[in-house]
Each structure stands twice: as structure tokens, then as C-alpha cells.
Amino acid sequence: MKRTLFSITTGIILSFLCLNIAAQTPSKTQTLPVKVQPVPAKKVYYQKRAIDTVKNTDFSLNGQYQFMLSRSKSLYGAKLINPARLNSVWKSANDTLRKERIELKNAKAKVSEQEKTIVSLKTEISGKENTLNDTTAKADEISFLGVSFTKGTYNIIVWSIIIILAIALFIVIARSAKNIIEAKHRTQLYDEISAEYQAYKAKSNEQQRKLARELQDERNIIEEMRSRGK
């Protein structure tokens, strides 16, 4: 928009300069004596100047500038611009510049206000982050037996204790299973020995009874022999 406005303003200034140069340039043709012959007077009829009724439909700055150029006549390569149209374009250019300056001022004020808001928000966010960090640190801290630990350290210690206890429990269970197997084996051996002992005892009792009967038989025989010898 600024470039278009600059080009239009430059065109207007150049048009003024061309008109001034064309008006101020002296004629270089030499005047020669000419015999003047009387010319019969003729009636000159002046036509009324036609009023330009064409209206501009594009009210933008570029549209007004192009309309002014299109409705201007050319003379010796220069444009004869209607001062009223030129004043209108100049007024539009000034109004546009004034409007642009106001909008630029408002935009700068808005940007400044937004920068202040951003700084305030950054300060607020920084404060909230510090509060959040403090809260997180307090929540992450665990006190055990008067000693403060972080959750990570506490979890490592707890899981280490759990793993050690699990290993110890596994060792105890393994040894208990071994002892149980050994006890079963010992019990089985005891049962076998006890059964053998009972069998041996029963056999010994049977032999003792048999020997006792044989001994009694021998005694009876001896008694009979004694009784016969008398």
C-alpha cells in the first residue's frame, strides 16, 4: 500500500513538473519578417465545452489516479490534468496517509500492550513453575525413620530389601525342601529298620520258644531216664 501511494504521489509531482517545464520553455524559432496581407474578417463560432459527465467507479487511491490519467489530455507528451481531479487525488492520498498513520499508531499501541501482557504472563508462568517444582519436590520426598529420601531412592531401597528377602526365602524353602526330603528318607529307613527289627525279634522269639521246647523235651527225657534208673 505504501509503495502504491509513493508511486502515485511521485506521478502527480512529475506531472506538475512537466506542466511547469512546458509552460516556461521559450520558443527557439527565429522570427522572420512576414508581409501581412489583409485578411477578410470571418465570423468565429465558439462551441460550448462539453462537460465531462463520466464518473469514477473505483474510489481507491489507485483507481482515482488511473481515472485522473485516463480523463486527462496529452500535450507535447505531457498530461494536462484537471486541478480539481488532482486536488481530489491529493486529498485522498493525504487521507490515506493519515489513516495509515492512525492505524500504525494503534497497531504500535496494541503491540506494546500485548508485549506488556506477554511479560506479565511470562512472570506468572515462571512463578507457577517455581511453585510446581517446589510442590513436586515435596511430593517426591519421603521421610523414613527421620531420614528424607526421594521416591526414586526409597523405591530402590524397598525393592532391594524385597529382592534380598525373596532370595533368603527361596534359600530357606530350598533348604527346607531338602531337609523334608532327608527326613522322609530317614523315616523310610527307620521304618525299614524297625520292620526288620520286628521281624528279627519275632524270629528270635520263635527260636527261643523252639529252643525252650527242645530244652524242656531234653529235660523230660533226662527225668524219665533218671526215673528208670532208680
Image (cartoon, rainbow, N blue to C red):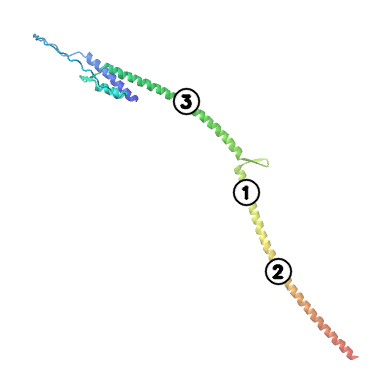
Regarding mark 2 in the picture, which secondary structure is present there? helix
Who comes first in sequence, dot 1 or dot 2? 1
User: Disc 1 and disc 2: Cα gap in Å?
Assistant: 43 Å
- The residue most toward the right is 230
Q: Residue at 30% of width from left, 21% of height from top?
A: 10
Q: Residue at 61% of width from left, 43% of height from top?
A: 153
Task: Tell me the kind of residue under disc 1.
Answer: Ser
Q: Is residue 173 above or below residue 7?
A: below
| Residue 24 in picture, x, y percent from top left | 23, 13
Regarding mark 1 in the picture, which secondary structure is present there? helix
Q: What residue sits right under mark 3 in the picture?
A: 113
User: Disc 3 and disc 1: Cα gap in Å?
Assistant: 57 Å
Q: What residue sits right under mark 2 in the picture?
A: 189
- The residue most toward the bottom is 229
Q: Quadrant of residue 100?
A: top left
Q: Nearer the viewer, mark 2 or mark 3?
A: 3
| Image quadrant where one finds the N terminus | top left
Q: Residues within 10 Å of mark 1 (few under 14, many from 20)?
A: few
Q: What residue sits right under mark 1 in the picture?
A: 160
Contact between marks 2 and 3 (CB within 8 A): the answer is no
Instruction: Residue 111: give its label.
Output: none
Contact between marks 3 and 1 (CB within 8 A): the answer is no
| Residue 18 in picture, x, y percent from top left | 24, 18
Who comes first in sequence, dot 3 or dot 1? 3
| Residue 9 in picture, x, y percent from top left | 31, 21
| Image quadrant where one finds the C terminus | bottom right
Asked if residue 49 lies left or right of residue 215, the reply is left
